[in-house]
Image (cartoon, helix red, strand yellow):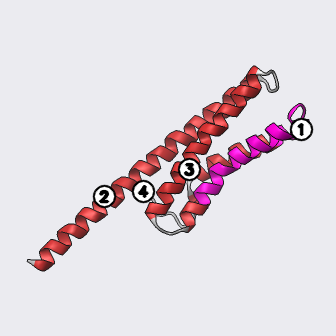
Amino acid sequence: MAKVDGFEDLDIWKIAIGIAVDVYLLCDSEPLKSDWGMKDQIRRAVCSLSDNIAEGFEYNNNADFIRFLVYAKGSAGEFRSEPTILKLAGKIKPEIADELSIRSVEFSAKTKTLIDYLKKFEKEKKKDRSKSHKSETA
């Protein structure tokens, strides 16, 4: 995996930001513009994707980062539910809801891949430390 200097370098963060910008623009037009409750809910859910990535990354340790990636993935599920509700209620066009859902699924899949990578990395690191400790005491 390539070296990452900041969370802004992560593809999942870029995907999350792109989805959030599109949701904000969607919320600026009717009928969402005047639906304060749903507008607030969908914006909070979608911003949680990138916010959790940023916060977790800044703790500078994989255990915390993994925990916040799990939160971001959970928020993606919450977010993905909302366009479906809006589509079925006739509040947004089906193609817009479907596109947001597809991008959310992509975000979830890539986030899971990163979580799995970090967990494997941590497991290998512990195994290497254990081997090193055993050879020092022998």
Q: Mark 1 vs mark 3: give the one in front.
A: 3
Q: Residue at x 87, y 36 (%)?
A: 35
CA separation, marks 1 and 4? 41 Å
Q: Going by the image, does 67 lie left or right of 131?
A: right
Mark 1 and mark 2 residues within 8 Å of each other at the beta carbon: no
Instruction: Kindly identify the amino acid type of the residue bearing the numbered disc 3.
Output: Tyr
- Mark 4 or 3, nearer chain start: 4
- Mark 1 or 2, nearer chain start: 1
- Mark 1 or 4, nearer chain start: 4
Q: Nearer the viewer, residue 57 or 44?
A: 44
- Residue 3 on the magenta segment: no
The local secondary structure at tag 2 comes to helix
Instruction: Kindly identify the amino acid type of the residue bearing the numbered disc 2.
Output: Lys
The residue segment tinted magenta is 25-54
Instruction: Name the image quarter holding the N terminus.
Output: bottom left
**Secondary structure mostly taken by the magenta-highlighted segment of the chain:** helix
CA separation, marks 3 and 2? 21 Å
- Mark 3 or 2, nearer chain start: 3
Disc 1 designates what residue? 33
Disc 4 designates what residue? 1
- Residue 35 on the magenta segment: yes
CA separation, marks 4 and 3? 22 Å
The local secondary structure at tag 1 comes to helix
The local secondary structure at tag 4 comes to loop
Image: 138 above or below 83:
below
Q: Position of residue 74 (x, y in %)?
A: 56, 43
Disc 2 designates what residue? 123
